[in-house]
Image (spheres, rainbow, N blue to C red):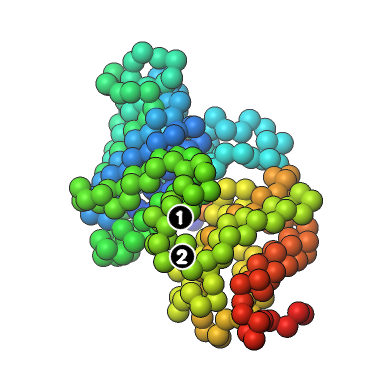
Amino acid sequence: MNRIQLLSPRLSNQIAAGEVVERPASVVKELLENSIDAGSTRVDIDVEQGGVKLIRIRDDGRGVVKEDLALALSRHATSKILELDDLEAVATLGFRGEALASISSVSRLTMSSRHQDSDEGWQVSVEGQDMTPQVKPTAHNVGTTVEVRDLFFNTPARRKFLRKEKTEFGHLEEVVKRIALSRFDVGISLKHNQRIIHSLRPASSEQEKARRVAGVCGPAFIQNSVTVNVEVGELKLWGWVGLPTFSRSQSDLQYFFVNGRVIRDKLVAHAIRQAYRDVLYSGRHPAFVLYLELDPATVDVNVHPTKHEVRFRDSRMVHDFLFRSLHRALAEVTPDDQKPTAS
Ligand code: ADP
Ligand code: MG
């Protein structure tokens, strides 16, 4: 029987990486969220070979000071929460301080940054976190660039689970779309193998937002949807719901955001399904881009590391609010003879 030993930091990071970093798409999600948390107004994403060979994300956010660069790559290092109470109302997308440590333990990672109060840029590089990161000067505008090369180069078992380039890129693009829909104020571009896939300008007016949604979801969605805008007490719901005639054979055009975070939640899905119940043929799936806004203290986002789930304090009330708002919006656009019976 072996004696108990503490895991080395490298091994424990790799184990944690198993949870946070499943594929290139997860890397893009974490890096993009970091850029947004840093207050960026523009983020450029460059990937090669579905992200397996290279993921480079450059932002114009506030940057990292030289002294913090190496620390940013270690586990449980975060500038976003200080005490447990902060968890009650996290305003940032990240807060666990795990992403960079995890990603750098399974890739060749370089982070270059210039802090907004500094005249100089600095860079750290690590390969699978096998060495103490060295900080050296580099030329950089205010903001941060993180470059992740050769994902899973040192964990062949995980590398084997990667799919074809096209599939990996599909997942990665989906992540970018979700964030593009959740942050209209940030300009986002995505290039794959030198080809421009998305180039989305910041949007503030209704018209610009609709154009951006069209850019992400396709023009047909905007042409075949109605806008929703309902506010009851502390709950607000807005966005676009596809007409029943625009239903799809797959649930591939469904975006739901809670206070800016994309989520997939059983309760929410149920409320939407109920609202469409009488107007959709069975087996068809509605298309929607919806935003729910509510007091951050009434929703728990700290349920799972990938943060797709939430827990509402008053789930019954949220469910009813969603159902009623959508049911009414759909009833208004459904011809009389197809109107759902009020129930
Ligand atoms: P978390 O986002 O949970 O804090 P990360 O491992 O993703 O943990 O990042 C660690 C820290 O590195 C962040 O708290 C932040 O201070 C800094 N950081 C990471 N990416 C950026 C970026 N693009 N711009 C500015 N700071 C960043
Ligand atoms: Mg993060």
Which residue appears farthest toward the left when viewing the image? 194
Label 1 sits on a secondary structure element that is: helix
Q: Nearer the viewer, mark 2 or mark 1?
A: 2
Foreground of the two, 313 or 239: 239
Q: Which residue is drawn at 38% across and 46% down?
A: 200
Q: In which quarter of the image is residue 276?
A: bottom right
Foreground of the two, 241 or 153: 241
Measured Cα–Cα span from mark 2 to mark 1: 11 Å
Could you tell me residue 76's position as x and y percent?
53, 36
Could you tell me residue 222's position as x and y percent?
47, 62
Residue identified by numbered label 2: 223
Label 2 sits on a secondary structure element that is: helix
**Camera sees residue 131:** no
Three-letter code, disc 2: Gln
The label number, if any, that marks residue 213 in the structure image: 1
Q: Residue at x 48, y 53 (%)?
A: 210
Three-letter code, disc 1: Val
Name the side, left or right, on which 310 lies relative to 111. Answer: right
Q: Is residue 28 above or below residue 308?
A: above
Q: Residue at x 34, y 15 (%)?
A: 120
Please tell me which of labels 2 and 1 falls first in the chain: 1
